[in-house]
Image (spheres, helix red, strand yellow):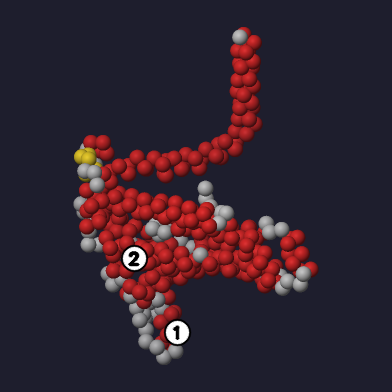
Amino acid sequence: MKSVNKAVSVKLDRKTGGFKRVWRENYQLWFIILIPLVWLIVFKYWPMYGAQIAFRNYRAVDGIWGSRWVGFSNFLKLFRNYMFPRIIKNTLIVSFYQLIISFPFPVILALALHNTMRIRFKKTVQMITYMPHFISVVVLVGMIMQFTNPHVGLINKLITALGGTARDFMASGTAFFHIYVWSNVWQNCGWGTIIYLAALSGVNMELHEAAMIDGASRFKRMLYIDIPCIIPTAVVLLIMDVGRIMAIGFEKAFLMQNLMNISSSEIISTYAYKVGLAQAAADFSYSTTISLFNSIINLILIFTVNAIASKWGETSLW
């Protein structure tokens, strides 16, 4: 018995010593990991504690636990609100429109850049397409307003020069959807190619060499080698995009809003901000209810799409 205890204690000492040695040798890496871990806990997981105010009649003077529990009454209030169908419709239109239009462009651009033989041209195109990603949302919306201005805007100047009639695009609800989505394509298309270019760089060159020996053209090699190799990456990114389908950007939609396009530009995130913070009598419980409902829908969507992907293909998030 003493020998068994001694063996166990020696084993534990070795494990402890091994951990201490690893910590002593790599403490810089542990500190680097600690920074994003703390950020994740503080800004992503700890706020979940406050999600319970969606089920309470929250009052700041009473605190979270002191506020009266009201169950699902805030959710019923949301579902019965006359604005609910409109904001859900607008959010879904913008989200699905953006997903359908924005998703294929980075793939097409990555394939085109990967198959070009002119390295200088490739680097130039990459730099030009990456640059819009670093433009802030405020500056981007300012550019959109200047370009679409009915009096001095570049777009209306071209329309009138071609014999058309100038119009205020920002006052049109239908134009809002197109401006929002296509400006997003222009801003993020180049940045989205980075992951696909990384995936294409990992394609086995022996496949291309074998295809060239068999007489396959560049287009055939792209069609039957490059595209199948990046499909797993595309599926994973598509699942993640679907999981964010109800969480489109608040800043851009809010900055593009005005009284004339509000019927189309009012989405879940902007409505939650207005009822939760922008009113004189802010309703924090109702605003949290809207955001929690939004998160639940996103969670259901990502689980559903992941299940479909794992059933019909070999790629999924888990």
Query: Among all residues in the image, which is located at the extreme top?
Result: 2
Q: Is residue 31 left or right of residue 159?
A: right
Camera-side residue of 189 and 79: 79
Marking on residue 185: none
Q: Residue at x 40, y 52 (%)?
A: 300
Q: Amino acid at mark 1?
A: Leu
Q: Is residue 61 visible?
A: no
Q: Amino acid at mark 2?
A: Asn
Camera-side residue of 142 and 270: 270
Marking on residue 158: 1
Q: Residues within 10 Å of mark 2 (few under 14, many from 20)?
A: some
Q: Image quadrant of residue 141? A: bottom left
Q: Image quadrant of residue 82? A: bottom left
Q: Residue at x 42, y 55 (%)?
A: 301
Which mark lies nearer to you, 2 or 1? 2
- Spot occupied by residue 250 in the image (x, y as percentages of width and height): 37, 59
Relative to 11, does residue 78 appear above or below in the rendering? below
Q: Is residue 3 left or right of residue 270?
A: right
Q: Is residue 22 visible?
A: yes
- Spot occupied by residue 143 in the image (x, y as percentages of width and height): 43, 70
The quadrant in which the N terminus is found is top right
Q: Is residue 269 left or right of residue 30?
A: left
Per the image, the residue denoted by label 2 is 90
Relative to 193, does residue 316 appear above or below in the rendering? above
Q: Residue at x 36, y 63 (%)?
A: 91
Q: Is residue 195 left or right of residue 69?
A: right
Q: Residue at x 31, y 71 (%)?
A: 261
- Spot occupied by residue 298 in the image (x, y as percentages of width and height): 40, 54
